[in-house]
Amino acid sequence: MSHAAAAKPATARKSPALSGTARVPGDKSISHRSMMFGGLASGETRVTGLLEGEDVMRTAAAMKAMGAHIEKRGTEWVIRGTGNGALLQPEGPLDFGNAGTGSRLTMGLVGTYDMETTFIGDASLSGRPMGRVLEPLRQMGVQVLKATPGDRMPITLHGPKHAAPITYRVPMASAQVKSAVLLAGLNTPGITTVIEPVMTRDHTEKMLRGFGANLSVETDERGVRHIFIEGQGKLTGQIIAVPGDPSSAGFPLVAALIVPGSDIVIENVLMNPTRTGLLLTLQEMGGKIDILNPRNAGGEDVADLRVRYSELKGVTVPPERAPSMIDEYPVLAVAASFAEGETLMQGLEELRVKESDRLSAVANGLKINGVDCTEGEASLAVRGKPGGKGLGGHPNGQDTTVQTHLDHRIAMSFLVMGLATEKPVTIDDAAMIATSFPEFMGLMTGLGAEIG
Ligand SMILES: O=C(O)C1=C[C@@H](OP(=O)(O)O)[C@@H](O)[C@H](O)C1
Ligand SMILES: C=C(OP(=O)(O)O)C(=O)O
């Protein structure tokens, strides 16, 4: 199976002030969807700024295996799709590596086809729950021919002759589940309805509309979103410029806040309000983050961020903010480790089912590096040490290597931490960083970070 390669440990050391201007790679959520929707639509889709991380490349390979033509010409990705409803049965299993988004959205996209598809992934992905996607698909008539107990991968699906449209209320705050049902609706006669009690990232809705899908959203008086999609319509290729990924931007951003004297600019960051929870929280903590040159690019808000070293203070992060910063809690916990007082994060149950159990991976990594924190069932409280005094590994020579559990965000978060701790921070494996941010090491060292 994938990612069986030898682990690549890495160490971050106390660094001089970070400075300079950087551009993070394209947004992962939009990049996956560009490949999928482009691969499905009629005609040509051209994409610039695509994240060329392993996760997105897996989605591209899956779409190719089902009949899409995808190639890179210069800096542009050119996709010729099959037309909605015309994907082909792949010859072998679709290997999604480490990617939850790629695999769950693709299960929705092709699960309703009257053909057999098998989904496999690495050890991390094979441990993640897929029942959340299989449950609505079963209601639409999809047969789960094979699955590992607990609805885990490897999974083989076979769709019905004609899928049944459903009305599905998403039981947890998950853009992946919402998206999987909407994508299944694309190949289903009639109207498929998704009810979303808590709003999550809306890239699927926005982009599908852009591709010509008949999709509408009504928000009721309690803020519950009702999303309607009409199946079997025509999708038409689009021109897409993918903005910088705010989740990736979180790493240089927090690094600049905690390394004394730092002053950096991160250009072209996606500012979609369903993705800006980290920014808001860090500003509440006293982070000096200036939003420069706000603009609209291809239907999305983007801006440049100037970030300066700041004396942070602890805050309580409201649980309802979790969907807008779900992947950013590990790096927020690192910022909190340098803040005065306690930072309390609540409503974190979804962190338990990411690439790793992020709640326990973060708490364990912080503790072995000297941070005082408390892990709850769905919460984390971090009591910071301004200046990072006494933090970092190897106090008595014992092994304080952070276990990353095949999780890119755990790896990057702890490397950021080590830039401001008194002693270095070491992680067991940096290999997974390539899934979402292959340029991470070069970008960070370019700003002055000492990582190796
Ligand atoms: O839809 C997406 O692109 C994503 C949704 C989120 O997952 P959940 O839907 O599981 O919260 C997020 O963690 C993931 O990185 C990307
Ligand atoms: C949770 C993440 O991704 P995925 O679910 O796509 O593996 C992430 O990138 O933090």
Image (cartoon, rainbow, N blue to C red):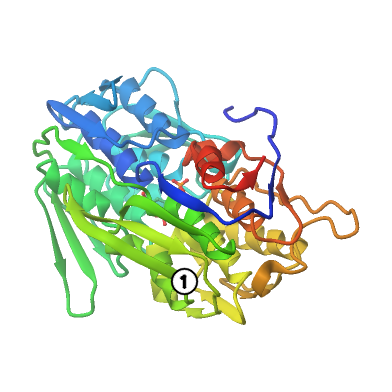
| Whether residue 172 can be seen here | no
Q: Position of residue 198 (x, y in %)?
A: 32, 69
For disc 1, the neighbor class at 10 Å (few under 14, some 14 to 19, many from 20) is: many
Does residue 236 appear left or right of residue 340 in this picture?
left
Q: Is ligand 2 less than 8 Å from the beta carbon at label 1?
A: no
Q: What quarter of the picture does the C terminus occupy?
A: top right
Q: Is residue 166 above or below residue 234?
A: below
Percent coordinates x, y for residue 158 in the rendering: 34, 33
The picture quadrant where one finds residue 386 is bottom right
Assign a secondary structure to mark 1.
loop
Judge whether residue 243 can be spotted in this image: yes
The residue under label 1 is which amino acid type?
A: Gly
Residue 105, by quadrant, is top left
**In the rendered picture of this protein, how many numbered marks are placed on residues?**
1
Q: Residue at x 20, y 56 (%)?
A: 295
Question: In this picture, is 181 found above or below 334?
Answer: above
Figure check: 347 above or below 331: below
Q: Looking at the image, which residue is at 78% across and 56% down?
A: 393
Residue reaching furthest right? 396
Q: Which residue is mark 1?
A: 287
